[in-house]
Image (tube, grey):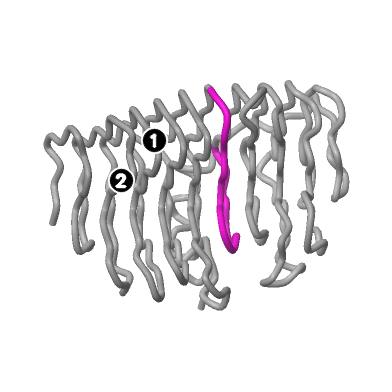
Amino acid sequence: MRYAYAAGLAVLTSIWCGSATAETTLCTEITSVPVTIKAQGIYCFKKDLTSSVASGNIIQINASNVTIDMNGRKLGGFTAGANTQAVGIAATNRRNITLRNGTVQGFRRGIVIDGTTDSTGYVLEDLRIEGNTQTGIEVGGTNGIVRNNLVTNTGLASLVNNTAIGILLKDSSRAVVRGNLISYVLGTSQARGVSVNGSSMVEISDNTILDVGAAYGGNFGIHARDTTAITVAGNRLLNLVSNYTSIGFYESELVDGFDCYDNSTRGYQYGQSGCDFSVNNQFH
């Protein structure tokens, strides 16, 4: 079953999802969805919220300097069906967006923080991103952190030509992806645990990536394309999914500077490809 794998990871939830975090109470409660946030401030969940809307952005952030503390609650979209096009939480060209401490599940893309002009200073932490059919987390802009999240059960085999990605950095610079658990990414054309496109000065470090598989194409634990100055360090990649071509960490059409060190890769056909600097990488 598609989501059965997540049950086996429940014991790890407290490590990646901040279950012990104190509840935020001095906040503006988000009471229903869909909703558009129009003013800066601290927002929070005090109950689980569910949407059956199959398109658009369920929580749209149209202001800078916004924090959403989910207080361990859930934003769910499974009732919209497997073909949903909806995004759970989205912001474009906003500054200082923080999302933390909750579950986003059942959307086409779980969280999208994008833009190249004013998108800067985002922090995504202690989140469980589960059961989204294309991308778990997608970020762009500058000076961002994606840390200590559990991204699991991304992709859906019934979607034709679907590339499933756990965490995607697109048009990003000066960004860090650290300490995340990315588990079970299943695409049809391709699958990628972490993908970095058109970006520079990005660190991908100390992540655990488990089971990244494509039904009919290739899969990559960590993938970089059209990027420069990317550091891949201290990551642990384990793959037991049956697939076609599989590479632990890989660059294609790279401009310059793909540095790989202290990574461990097991269960892929190839450990690495295209590293400009490679030290102490283990391939089993």
* Rendering coords of residue 62 (x, y %): 81, 32
Mark 2 residue element: strand
Q: Which quadrant is the C terminus positioned in? A: bottom left
Height in image: 105 above or below 69? below
Q: Main secondary structure of the magenta part?
A: strand
Magenta-drawn segment = 126-142
Kindly identify which residue carries mark 1: 227
Q: Residue at 73% across / 21% down in the picture?
A: 65
> Type of residue at label 1?
Thr
* Rendering coords of residue 32 (x, y %): 87, 48
Mark 1 residue element: loop
Q: Residue at 51% across / 75% down in the picture?
A: 157
Kindly check if marks 2 and 1 are in contact, taking CB atoms under 8 A apart as contact: yes
Kindly identify which residue carries mark 2: 251
* Rendering coords of residue 11 (x, y %): 44, 54
Earlier residue among tags 2 and 1? 1
Q: Residue at 71% across / 34% down in the picture?
A: 92
Residue 138 in the magenta stretch? The answer is: yes
Left or right: where 279 falls relative to 27: left
**Mark 1 crowdedness (10 Å alpha carbons): few <14, some 14-19, many ≥20:** many
Residue 172 in the magenta stretch? The answer is: no
Q: Residue at 76% across / 68% down in the picture?
A: 79
